[in-house]
Image: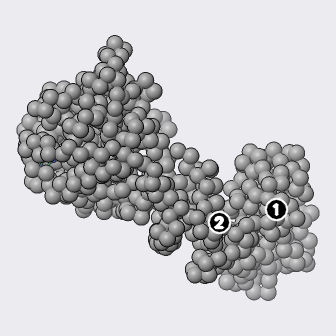
Amino acid sequence: MADLDMSLQFLKGVGPARYEILQKLGLNTVEDILNYFPRDYEDRGNYKKICELIDGETTAIKAIVKTNVSEQRIRRNMAIYKVIAEDGTGNIILTWFNQPYIKKQLCVGEEYSFYGKVKNTLGRIEIQSPVFEKAEASKNTGKIIPIYPLTAGITQNVFRGIVELAVKSSLEEVQESMPNWILDKYRLPSFKWAMQNIHFPEKLEDFEKARKRIAFDELLTMQLALLRFKEKGNEDRDGISFSIDENVDELLNTLPYKLTNAQMRVWKEIDKDMRSSKSMNRLVQGDVGSGKTAVATLAMFKAVKNGYQAAMMAPTAILARQHYEGISKMLAPFNMNVELLTSDITKKNKALVLERLKNGEIDILIGTHALLEENVEFKNAGLVITDEQHRFGVRQRSVLSAKGNLTDTLVMTATPIPRTLAIILYGDLDISIIDELPPGRQKIDTYAVKRNMDERINAFINKELNAGRQAYIVCPLVEESEHMEGVKSVVEQFEYYKKVLANYKVEMLHGKMKPKDKDDIMQRFKQGEINAIISTTVIEVGVDVPNSTLMIIENAERFGLAQLHQLRGRVGRGKHKSYCVLKYEGNSDIVKQRMEIMQKSNDGFVISEKDLELRGPGEFFGTRQHGIPEFRVANLFTDIPIMKVAQEIANRIIEEDPRLEKPENTILLNGINKLFEEKISI
Ligand code: ADP
Ligand code: MG
């Protein structure tokens, strides 16, 4: 019997060289091995008859070798080894490349198990490079074989041997992770059984059952952790009670429009949080153009009227400046000091801003990541807002909140995500949804087109510019890249469109430019001096230029749907009819489906559900999305049914035992604590 924390170097068969390789895989102890799950399985136990074999299937057979191994040199460094075998129902050719030792390993008249991919060309049945062993052995064939994610220097067979030994010697030590009452109620197998069967299932159903059990563990623990986190927040997060509120109407009355019902409802929710003596921790989700900024401004206005400072952080300098200008204008009648802080202001100005912020002379500070720097100190921040939260990490959000004492926190996002996922991603937040667009918004006509339409599209752009409108042309790359042939870059397309739109002022915009130059171009675009911008996705979030009516996207197949939707949201913001043209390459079904969804739907929620469905959560969120828990087996998309059950159970448990103090829940509390140690150390 081996302890779970026993070092692998003491395991039989693991010498110093192998130990080193295992360490490279992040495996140090026996427990690490138990937790290192297969990436796939091969069913080498389900023998088929040779006469039943189908072209293309990967399968196992048992057959007797009929001929000696023949060797055929086809090139100087390439030899083919061949035998014929039969099982009474037919003959099969077995082939290996450059493996002379095969000659010694196969004997005529002996029966072997073979496993590999079948090729059936006009009745000539063949398996190339099959795995094999004597029929009576059952080490590498004859059963379901787990396949592990490995690195060079160790084979599947050797690694599997190590796992086998680790499981055999320490399975007894594995502790149950769920209370009995849950196991009984939901008829779940024990954790021990699941661990055995995730590695070495006898039947494929067993593997699936084991996987589900472990996925359930992961999802329930995560749910509980998030609820617990939230609960704890509510317990010990005394906040500011912003009680003066009659003045907010003044601001509402000076706005050039009436809030939509949805904006009003969400504002009421925020207002209630702000008045309460607990601190606010709220997420506002609203499709592009739903008017989140106005709602955020109301909240900042209220905070300032109550004698506090407020801050708002945006992911790009362009957006920060736009907010600064828009919000300054909205608040102009109210004698509030609004300032902008991005990393590209001069040192001298920055020092001045920081000084005034600390004195309390600045009421509202708007900026980029620059707000997170240590030397940004407020006199008394009462409210912090993060715009386009999906561009930031959880950690950045909390750094900003920590700038004040007991601050209220509001985060906003236009990436609508299905609720089940929202709970996982933003589990510690209350959620408000602005599910209505301001009246009079026109539907943006969307066309997905191939290269052969270039001429017509170019004529169309010219026509729109001629009518006084403006256009965005978005490319996936900044510069040409030899690694991505055929993918359009800003630099190259800039040259192209300068010719195509010869009568107009065209500029480019991308992340490698100096912030000042970017700002300058954006300003001139806003003022109408520039007619078309060739840009990367730096303009993706938030940019608001109502006179732009055309969004052309090059290589649209390279963007996520949610991102395309965001990009499209840059037009259709004014009174003019707007268009989005998706220029795409490729004929795959997925690409076509994605383009079709974009043409059909203008609803961010629908689009993101589809995106998630087509791409899976990993790509959907991209690697930059921090704060998404990584699961070992649970899949945030395909395991939604398990997640729902887990959410239900978690809610019930926390309701009955908010601090998980009951003895039967200790085991769950331990699991959560472990999770926090490992993963969510925010
Ligand atoms: P987002 O939710 O994408 O951040 P914005 O706050 O940028 O949206 O608002 C988009 C545009 O809609 C802005 O030009 C804003 O002035 C305008 N707007 C916001 N609320 C309303 C409303 N209730 N009625 C009309 N226009 C509105
Ligand atoms: Mg916005």
Of marks 2 and 1, the one in the foreground: 2
In the rendered image, is residue 52 in sight? yes
On screen, residue 321 above or below 672: above
Which percent across, then down, holds residue 293?
A: 23, 43
Q: Is mark 2 within 8 Å of ligand 1?
A: no
The amino acid beneath tag 1 is Ala
Residue placed at 56% from the left, 54% from the top?
630
Total marks shown come to 2
Depicted 615 relative to depicted 546: above or below: below
Q: Residues within 10 Å of mark 1 (few under 14, many from 20)?
A: many
Quarter of the rendering containing residue 213: bottom right
Using residue 120 as the reference point, say whether residue 175 is left or right of it: right
Q: Residue at x 63, y 65 (%)?
A: 666
Amino acid, disc 2: Ile
Q: Mark 1 points at which residue?
A: 166
Relative to 408, is 203 above or below? Answer: below
Q: Mark 2 points at which residue?
A: 667
Q: Judge left or right: residue 81 versus residue 447.
A: right
Q: In which quarter of the image is residue 417?
A: bottom left
